[in-house]
Amino acid sequence: MSDAVPMVTLNNQVEIPQLGFGVFQVDPAETGDVVRQALEVGYRHIDTAEMYGNEKGVAEGISASGLERSEVWITSKINNNNHGREKTLRAFDQSLADLKIDQIDLMLIHWPLPDAGDFVGTWQALSEMYRAGRARTIGVSNFQPTHLDRLAQESDVVPVVNQIEVHPYLTQESLRAYNQRHQIATEAWSPIAQGGVLDDSVITGLAEKYDRTPAQIVLRWHVQLGSIVFPKTVTPSRMKENLDLFDFELADDDMAAVSGLNKDERTGPDPDEFNYIPD
Ligand code: NDP
């Protein structure tokens, strides 16, 4: 078995590293250092967002790493107050300026905001940026099937990914299956439920059985489900731990035991009800 991070081929044939590094709740002032350390450890995929306020720090970290731009996958997201064609085009430009790049690997709509936003207009703007070559791929986050069905009615461009909350207490079986049927890759956010699943006795039992940490068991479960995943940590030892997933494999019954922990329990908002727009 190779220790290298596998690549996932998206629906427009672009390849994304299956394991990345998330920077939600990383202090903007520390993000440069944290991202540089993550890149030194071996991550080649950073997941940020305008909402996190740390895109400039991501740029600093990549610059400090000495890596070529083409060696690092960058995902960002259009914030909730920038829905609609004109605002999205401006926000897109600002994100690329803050990230100090001419082309982004993946730009997402952060939330659908079904009652307060305009995800169709936002998607049209992202599609223009995709066609112009300013985004290698575009996708969505926190979309439910009704939102994806609506997009499919309004646009020929199919999102490459749907980034959704997934972890052992929220396995999202039917939404992941929907994504798969529509050639949309699933990205799993809060993959260890911000630490909330690591004390579960099934997870700690498997950690003992495989001589791995609880976080490694859960992250390996995501990898074997085929999801793209980007745990966040500011702790250097955990950066290494969370990357070290590719020299062991969970048996089918152990995969089923982790999936069996599902209780449809969210740590974040319900996308059907979340309509928050910041000032
Ligand atoms: P995670 O599930 O990645 O958990 C992060 C937390 O777990 C931190 O408190 C971290 O602590 C701790 N942790 C990390 N690794 C370990 C480990 N090996 N052992 C024990 N504890 C550990 O949560 P996030 O919410 O950050 O999700 C990951 C990424 O997903 C985000 O950073 C972001 O990129 C994306 N995301 C997207 C959302 C969306 O709406 N699209 C919403 C939420 C997240 P410490 O840092 O102190 O080490």
Image (cartoon, rainbow, N blue to C red):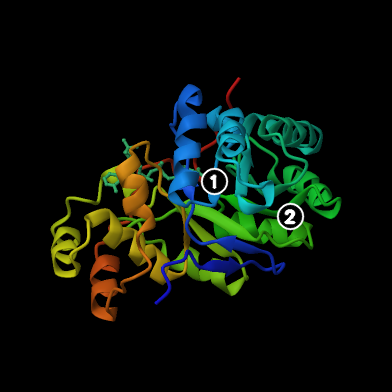
In the image, 31: left or right of 257? Answer: right
Residue 97's place in the image compared with 232, above or below, is above
Of residues 143 and 115, the one nearer the viewer is: 143
Q: Which mark is residue 136?
A: 2
Residue type at numbered disc 1: Ile
Residues tagged 2 and 1 counted as in contact (Cβ below 8 A): no
Dividing the picture into quadrants, the one containing residue 212 is bottom left
Quarter occupied by the N terminus: bottom left
Q: Secondary structure at mark 1?
A: strand
Residue 5's place in the image compared with 195, above or below, is below
Dividing the picture into quadrants, the one containing residue 27 is top left
Q: Residue most toward the front?
A: 66
Residue 27 seen in the figure: yes
- Disc on the earlier residue, 2 or 1: 1
Q: CA separation, marks 2 and 1?
A: 15 Å
- Residue 35 in the image, given as x and y percentages of width and height: 49, 38
Numbered-mark total: 2
Q: Residue most toward the bottom?
A: 252
Q: Secondary structure at mark 2?
A: strand
In the image, 72: left or right of 222? Answer: right
Of residues 213 and 81, the one nearer the viewer is: 213
The residue under the point 63% across, 53% down is 71
Residue 81's place in the image compared with 180, above or below, is above
Residue type at numbered disc 2: Arg
- The residue identified by callout 1 is 46
